[in-house]
């Protein structure tokens, strides 16, 4: 065989092998290995998001916004299902209002793409969430049904320079929603007295019915389970930071 022909044959074999590998990876990622049981509606407090990233976010929203709708124990289930902004164009006004990119408020779609690729492609295992439009649309519906902002107001839980007891917040939310929520905090930094409230999670079944996020007696997640930032709040006092308006 001539060297050029041998080279071309080698290249074709290599391509074929890579294609097979790619195919196997795609089908593994979309297989049942990522089966999940619980959906977590994650609300975050934008003031704390800005504090966490130490980024100069200007005037973050002064209401709880959506971080994501996350299936438990599932991430990046279908890498070959790209995010398409066009599919959710009808939802954009609500998306910008309730699911803004707090860190990059001038370009929300990177954040939505990230949430879709990491969590949405896994949530899509159930028919009610099996498209981008359904995933984002249902998430917005759940957020609006939960009305966390007005519930907290009603409970008298407002951003304040005085500290709250985490158990009081959890008990108040449980009394309103009838299920056990999860509250996450930033641990105190050097020089700070207490942790800072960052996220409130409310959980749903696959049928989108509210359920407990944790079961009574379930062990606490180990410290740092969510990376260097947020952790399940320690029982005890916590700071719910008021927004600081910058002068324009
Ligand atoms: P996950 O990757 O599981 O969806 O969420 C964790 C990551 O989201 C963290 O790296 C955190 O910094 C990031 N994050 C939280 N809120 C925002 C936001 O509003 N915008 C962007 N771009 N990232 C965020």
Image (cartoon, rainbow, N blue to C red):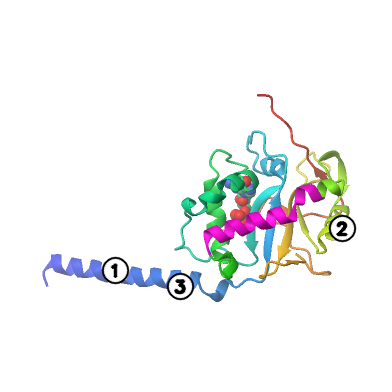
Comes first in the chain, label 3 or label 2: 3
Q: Which residues are magenta?
A: 131-151
Mark 3, residues whose alpha carbon is within 10 Å: few (<14), some, or many (≥20)?
some
**Which residue lies at the image location 74% right of the left edge and 56% below the top edge?**
146
Q: Which mark is residue 27?
A: 3
**Which residue lies at the image location 54% right of the left edge and 53% below the top edge?**
114
**Residue 187 in view:** no
Of residues 141 and 243, the one drawn nearer to the viewer in this rendering: 141
| 184 in the magenta segment | no
Helix, strand, or loop for circle 2?
helix
Q: CA distance from mark 1 to mark 2?
A: 60 Å
The residue where tag 1 is placed is 14
Q: CA distance from mark 3 to mark 2?
A: 43 Å
The residue where tag 2 is placed is 171
Residue 223 is situated, as x and y percent measured from the top left of the image, at 73, 58
| 139 in the magenta segment | yes
Q: Which label sits in the foreground, 1 or 3?
A: 3
Residue 144 is situated, as x and y percent measured from the top left of the image, at 70, 53
Comes first in the chain, label 1 or label 2: 1
Q: Residue furthest top?
A: 248
Mark 1, residues whose alpha carbon is within 10 Å: few (<14), some, or many (≥20)?
few
Helix, strand, or loop for circle 1?
helix
Q: Which label sits in the foreground, 3 or 2?
A: 2
């Amino acid at each position: 065989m001539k060297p050029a022909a041998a080279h071309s044959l080698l290249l074709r074999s290599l391509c074929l092998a890579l294609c097979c590998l790619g195919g196997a990876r795609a089908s593994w990622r979309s297989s049942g290995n990522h089966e999940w049981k619980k959906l977590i509606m994650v609300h975050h407090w934008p003031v704390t998001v800005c504090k966490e990233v130490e980024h100069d976010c200007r005037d973050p929203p002064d209401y709880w916004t959506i971080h994501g709708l996350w299936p438990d124990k599932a991430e990046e289930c279908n890498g070959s299902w790209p995010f398409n902004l066009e599919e959710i164009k009808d939802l954009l006004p609500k998306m910008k209002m309730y699911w803004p990119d707090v860190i990059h408020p001038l370009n929300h779609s990177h954040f939505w793409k990230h949430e879709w690729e990491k969590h949405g492609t896994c949530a899509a295992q159930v028919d009610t969430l099996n498209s981008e439009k359904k995933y984002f649309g249902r998430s917005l519906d759940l957020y609006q049904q939960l009305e966390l902002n007005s519930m907290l107001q009603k409970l008298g839980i407002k951003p304040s320079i005085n500290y709250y007891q985490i158990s009081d917040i959890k008990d108040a939310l449980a009394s309103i929603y009838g299920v056990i929520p999860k509250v996450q905090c930033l641990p105190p930094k050097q020089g700070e007295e207490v942790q800072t409230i960052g996220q409130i999670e409310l959980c749903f079944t696959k049928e989108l019915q509210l359920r407990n996020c944790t079961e009574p007696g379930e062990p606490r997640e180990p410290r740092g389970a969510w990376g260097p930032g947020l952790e399940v709040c320690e029982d005890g006092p916590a700071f719910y930071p008021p927004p600081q308006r910058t002068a324009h």
